[in-house]
Amino acid sequence: MSTTRLGAHDLLALVLDTGSYSSWDEEPVDVRPGPEYAVALASAREKSGVDEAIITGEGLLRGRRVAVVAGEFAFLAGSIGVAASDRLTRAVRRATAEGLPLLAAPVSGGTRMQEGTVAFLQMVRITAAVTAHKAAGLPYLVYLRHPTTGGVLASWGSLGHVTVAEPGALIGFLGPRVYEALHGRPFPEGVQRAENLFAHGIVDAVLEPERVADVLDRALTVLTASRTPAVPSLPTDLDSLVENAPAWDSVVTSRRKERPGIRRLLRYAARDVVPLNGTGAGESDPGLLLALARFGEVPCVVLGQDRRGQTETRPMGPAALREAQRGMRLARELHLPLVAVIDTPGAALSQEAEEGGMAGEIARCLAELVELRAPTLSVLLGPGTGGGALALVPADRTVAAEHGWLSPLPPEGASAIVHRDVSHAPEMAQAQGVRSTDLLRAGLVDRVVPELPDATVEPEAFCRRLGAVLQHELATLLATPDDERHAARLERFAALGQVAEPAI
């Protein structure tokens, strides 16, 4: 843990451009404190150098105007009472009215006990203001400092689109000292630490204060990017480069361990990538990667099945789909396009998956994608097997790598059902029309990106080629009116099977 706790002004001096901070604070409202409380407030002002536990204002972050709200622990342990709440909510509402991204840096022991239940209920008021800010499509980014506990964590500390935490920070709903006093035993060591919360998918990163500005800048570069980028042109010969290879060749090719996946796609083809972590609700699955990014000038939320994180002993579980749903919510709240990358040998078939609600999570992903008002683009990057792949299919447009494929079961499984052996897998792959070119003819895929001859042997060139296609498709979708785009998506899936041609 950091040995020195930064004050609110010290933190803002690290994050904001030098000399750019301007306070929004007014004289705190009079809560008519009793004699003892009045002495405590006067002492807190003298000790901390601020007049309340919250400071607010605006500044520049790498030249970009932002609003800020930050806690000051030296003022009565950063506790929130009526005056602090009033200041905080006024700042949030001003940021919303002026269309500014909002950076929040809580640090607090929770509710101010001297004000009792009235102070406790201020968390509802603060949450309402933050919710309205997010409903306006404006970014809300949170840096949790040491310590952040109680109602502060359970309100404005846990609502960030992106949430990072200070190394070693104590972050918990109930402070350990209170827990021990109530229960007569210490709280388990390490549970309420930032690093443990990261391991459980509750915060997106653990970062020293000196690194926060870099991450916030990258995130805001994506979140505040233009939603009307120019539509770039594409080479006219892409379609002619796709070969008519047998379906089984694609199946075998797509399973090569060296084949580029979502991580290399982001490395070679995207920019300003901000990795996110977990569901934000206590789960993280290595089978899915979630990030903010830009392809060219086009911002988006990316959620991708990561074959590197899927193994025979730990296939993609229900938590991965709950993490995907977090990405869908971000796209909806921030009015960002969503890119869903399909690359999986199949979801987990296990007791844990059944008890974790795998089927229900697939259904919820489908329902969310069908109704999502944001532009959506699905990418068939590699194997697309079963319900785990289906969960990310519905989209306005679908792009496939040449050797990407989609099937209800692996071809071996289909062969076992129909022929009671696996030796007919190549025939089943061909007959079921799983390959990208079959899906293109059936109207299930809109564009096939060639592999020359295989993405495994040209990973960077292929990823850049695919990235250019994604940029073109996303910019085109952004240029389409929302209602028109959504109606076309619903019509697309309503018409499935009515115009499909037989597989070759």
Image (cartoon, grey):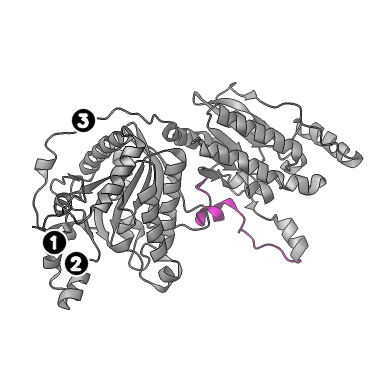
What amino acid type should be assigned to the residue bearing mark 3?
Answer: Ser
Compute the Cα span from label 2 to label 1.
9 Å
Q: Which of marks 3 and 1 is in front?
A: 3
| Image-based side of 189 in relation to 419, left or right | right
Range of residues picked out in magenta? 184-206
What amino acid type should be assigned to the residue bearing mark 1?
Answer: Trp
On the image, the x and y values in percent for residue 130 come to: 59, 39
On the image, the x and y values in percent for residue 88 come to: 67, 35
**Looking at the image, is mark 2 or mark 1 earlier in the sequence?**
1
Which residue has dot 3 on it?
Answer: 233
Q: Nearer the viewer, residue 183 or 405?
A: 405
Q: Give me the disc on residue 411.
A: 2
What amino acid type should be assigned to the residue bearing mark 2?
Answer: Pro
Residue placed furthest toward the bottom: 420
Whether the residues at callouts 2 and 1 have beta carbons within 8 Å, the answer is yes
Mark 1: secondary structure: helix
Specify few, some or many for label 3: CA neighbours under 10 Å numbering under 14, 14-19, or 20 or more: few
Q: Quadrant of residue 415?
A: bottom left
Q: Is residue 185 magenta?
A: yes
Residue placed furthest toward the right: 35
Which residue has dot 1 on it?
Answer: 248
| Residue 376 visible in the displayed image | no
**Looking at the image, is mark 2 or mark 3 earlier in the sequence?**
3
Q: In which quarter of the image is residue 365?
A: bottom left
